[in-house]
Image (tube, grey):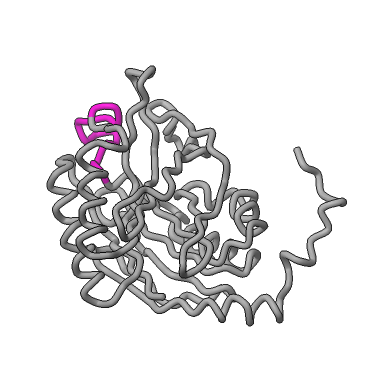
Amino acid sequence: MKVAIAQLSASTDKMSNLEKAKKYISKAKGLGADFVILPELYMALAIPGSGISPVDVAEPLEGPFVSGLAEAARENEIYIVCGIFESKVDDEQRAYNTTVFIDRYGQILQSYRKTHLYDAFNYKESDAIVPGDNQYKVVETEFGKIGLMVCYEVRFPEIARQLALQEADILFIPAGWVAGAMKEDHWETLLRARAIENTVFVCASNQAGNVFSGRSMIVDPMGVIVTSGGEEETLIMSDIDLNRVHRVREKLPSVVNRKPEFYVTT
């Protein structure tokens, strides 16, 4: 299988962002990709200082933005992962930070609402975002089992482990990782750690430009960075050999060797 990461910069114009996404989706398909991963929050640049908030741009899953992505998935026969703002009917101040996973026929396989919000580094995502309460579930495809988690959640190893215990082969991680002191070091270290400790591929798509740091990457189950991007908009891609997962797990059966009877569960 071949995975493409579209490391893009979002604007405040939703339809402009959608049209750019479609161009990169088509380009990824032209290069033979089976999956294309767009960043977290890609629907619109709804951050402090941008002039708009998440609730201003949020839509239901059947709204025009996701419908446009679904159309692109059907036209290109490609799986798409993308971060959006999903409206919450009973909250006029906040929206969900949702990642949609769309199959090659335009059907939503999973809509994952970010559970661990970025209330850190002098920022409080929960002021504008409602935390999700969905369970962590892998998505089964003809290529393998895939788990979703989002940006800040890479700092919580419990999430990736829950997905690994469901035999995930790959983690897709859309992100809006903000630049800052030590942040790029944290980003790379955490992505490699999640790959190594769970013996999975990690495919992480970060926003570029504005306040974000870029550096999207694909990491293999031994923690090797297979490909990565810089700080600008780009499309990176790599072949994913799932037999590599099995070979690594034969040498390093760390998930199988767990001793849950010794672990605190709360």
Q: Quadrant of the N terminus?
A: bottom left
Q: Position of residue 147 (x, y in %)?
A: 52, 56
Q: Position of residue 165 (x, y in %)?
A: 67, 57
Q: Quadrant of the C terminus?
A: top right
Looking at the image, residue 69 sits to the left or right of residue 102; the answer is: left
Q: Position of residue 113 (x, y in %)?
A: 45, 39
Instruction: Name the one closer to the observer, 229 or 165.
Output: 165
Residue 44: quadrant of the picture: top left
* Residue 39 versus residue 52 in the image, above or below: below
Q: Position of residue 3 (x, y in %)?
A: 37, 70
- Residue drawn 36% across and 29% down? 95
Report the magenta residues as a range: 43-56
- Residue drawn 38% across and 52% down? 101
Q: Is residue 185 magenta?
A: no
- Residue drawn 32% across and 37% down? 61
The prevailing secondary structure element of the residues shown in magenta is loop
